[in-house]
Image (spheres, grey):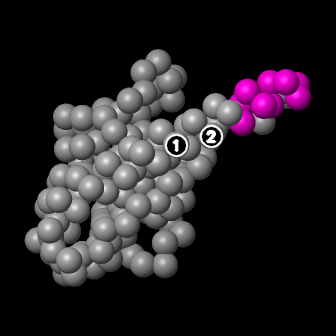
Amino acid sequence: MIEGKFVVASDGSESAKKAERYAAELAACLGLPVDVVNVIQVGGSAFVSSGATLALETELAEEIEDRGQELREALKRVRGVVRDQTVSVTGHLLEATSPARAIVEYCSTSAEPIAAVVLGNRGTGGFPRLLMGSVSDQVVKTADCPVIVVKA
């Protein structure tokens, strides 16, 4: 028997929207909760001058607003598919240097078991993927729970 909750990672991409739908359909069929997560990617520890600090803070505030809006839209889409008021759908905005690391840590520290992490196979990233591999690849390799990768 499958127990726990589904965690779906959303970045607003078309692939993520397909993953949201897949997770929502599974949750509705099984009566399990869904946590929708969106990650704010913050830079590493680099030296910045005080003038640059203000610019970074402004940029971070804009990123938080953008990611928060993406999360609200994702929650609306997932709730629209689930439609069952007994199935909990919650959103979480995570902050990390690596989206994959944030997703894996979120799952590994959850008090509730994770039925599966659901991700799209293509996000909004571009060149960094060539350097580090995709978020879905990294989550598949490092997560301690089942991972479902939905093809775009």
Residue 149 % position (x, y): 26, 46
Left or right: residue 128 versus residue 34 is right
Q: Which mark is residue 61?
A: 2
Left or right: residue 42 versus residue 103 is right
Q: Quadrant of the C terminus?
A: top left
What amino acid is at disc 1?
Answer: Glu
Q: How many marks?
A: 2
Q: Main secondary structure of the magenta part?
A: helix
The residue to which callout 1 is attached is 65
Q: Which residues are magenta?
A: 49-57
Residue 19 % position (x, y): 24, 48
Q: Is residue 117 above or below residue 38?
A: below
Along the viewing direction, whichever of 72 and 35 lies nearer the viewer: 72
- Residue 142 in view of the camera: no
Residue at the right extreme, as displayed: 50
Question: Residue at point 47% right, 43% down?
Answer: 67
Question: Residue at point 54% right, 69% down?
Answer: 109
What amino acid is at disc 2?
Answer: Ala
Residue at the top extreme, as displayed: 127
Question: Residue at point 60% right, 46% down?
Answer: 96
Residue at the left extreme, as displayed: 29
Residue 61 % position (x, y): 62, 40
Q: SS of the residue at dot 2? A: helix
- Residue 151 in view of the camera: yes
Q: Residues within 10 Å of mark 2 (few under 14, many from 20)?
A: few
Q: SS of the residue at dot 1? A: helix
- In which image quadrant can residue 145 be found? bottom left
Residue 57 % position (x, y): 72, 36
Q: Are marks 2 and 1 in contact (CB under 8 Å)?
A: yes
